[in-house]
């Protein structure tokens, strides 16, 4: 009887993990036509409210950014430094936005962003991953480039909408990453370690698609 219960629990565990991975894949692949990277259709936010809403929207409607934020939260769940990973990412993202506003160019930003999604997907899919400061450094490095891209939507804005924009994208990224962190932590503690690896494979696919698209656009510009 005990053996049957154990088998049933394992089947249920695998089913739950696959279901959650499927849900993540569905959410990340939802089509978002006409919105990517420009919440106000390219218009620079002019008020505090517009700046805050634009900041909230930018990391969500940009599929590459959203995927990475989920990835960094899941990696935090299996990292010795835990929540320090998303914190390092969002702090570095603010610095990256500042670099853009200061007209300091980060080379090949879109390629690096796509590569960061693929790279963090690979790290999630691995059984043995780097730990400690290495992971914090990778998260912060990626944050610089993601933040640099965020700066495009706010370039030329006044101080108030700019501050609101920074607050908005910081809040939404931390919220998403922390939610992913707790989901990953709960499942790994409940003996469902394959969930993180399966999610990593989904994220790898998304990152590879973005990287291939960016490489083609770079090599064969329209």
Image (cartoon, rainbow, N blue to C red):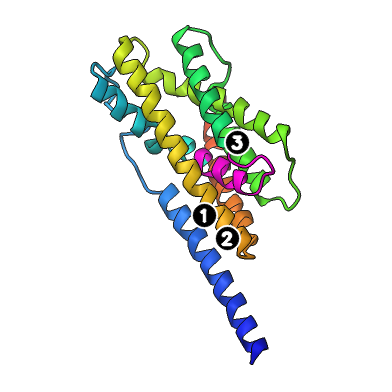
Q: Which mark is residue 187?
A: 2
**Residue 16 image offset from top left, x and y in percent:** 52, 68
Q: Which mark is residue 183?
A: 1
**Residue 148 image offset from top left, x and y in percent:** 49, 20
Please, is residue 159 above or below residue 165 in the view? above
Q: CA distance from mark 2 to mark 1?
A: 6 Å
Q: Judge whether residue 25 can be spotted in this image.
A: yes
At 36% from the left edge and 18% from the top edge, which residue is drawn? 163
Q: How many circles with numbers are drawn on the protein? A: 3
Residue 34 counted in the magenta span: no
First reached walking from the N terminus: tag 3 or tag 1: 3
At 45% from the left edge and 42% from the top edge, which residue is drawn? 176
Find the magenta span and give its range.
68-84
Residue most extreme to the bottom: 1
Q: Quadrant of residue 197?
A: bottom right
Q: Which mark is residue 121?
A: none
First reached walking from the N terminus: tag 3 or tag 2: 3
Which of the image's four quarters has the C terminus?
top left
**Residue 143 image offset from top left, x and y in percent:** 55, 27
Which of the image's four quarters has the N terminus?
bottom right
> What residue is disc 3 on?
85
Does the magenta stretch mainly form a helix, a strand or a loop? Answer: helix
Badge 2 crowding class, 10 Å Cα cut-off, few under 14, some 14 to 19, many 20 or more, is some
At 49% from the left edge and 65% from the top edge, which residue is drawn? 19
**Residue 18 image offset from top left, x and y in percent:** 54, 65
Please, is residue 191 above or below residue 138 in the view? below
Q: Pointers 3 and 2 in contact (CB under 8 A)? A: no
Q: Secondary structure at mark 1?
A: helix
Q: CA distance from mark 3 to mark 1?
A: 15 Å
At 60% from the left edge and 33% from the top edge, which residue is drawn? 115
Q: Pointers 2 and 1 in contact (CB under 8 A)? A: yes
């Amino acid at each position: 009887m005990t053996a049957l219960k154990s088998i049933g629990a394992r089947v249920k565990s695998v089913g739950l993990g696959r279901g959650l991975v499927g849900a993540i894949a569905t959410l990340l692949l939802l089509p978002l036509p006409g919105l990517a990277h420009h919440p106000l259709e390219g218009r620079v936010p002019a008020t505090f409210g517009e700046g805050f809403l634009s900041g909230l929207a930018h990391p969500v409607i940009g599929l590459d950014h959203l995927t990475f934020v989920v990835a960094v939260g899941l990696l935090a769940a299996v990292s010795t430094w835990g929540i320090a990973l998303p914190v390092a990412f969002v702090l570095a993202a603010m610095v990256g936005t500042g670099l853009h506003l200061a007209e300091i160019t980060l080379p090949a930003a879109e390629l690096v962003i796509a590569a960061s999604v693929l790279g963090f997907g690979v790290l999630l899919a691995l059984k043995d991953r780097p730990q400690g400061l290495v992971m914090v450094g990778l998260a912060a490095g990626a944050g610089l480039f993601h933040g640099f891209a965020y700066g495009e939507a706010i370039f030329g804005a006044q101080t108030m909408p700019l501050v609101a924009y920074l607050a908005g994208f910081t809040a939404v990224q931390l919220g998403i990453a922390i939610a992913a962190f707790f989901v990953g932590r709960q499942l790994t503690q409940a003996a469902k370690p394959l969930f993180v690896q399966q999610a990593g494979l989904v994220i790898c696919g998304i990152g590879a698609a973005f990287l291939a698209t960016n490489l083609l656009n770079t090599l064969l510009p329209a």
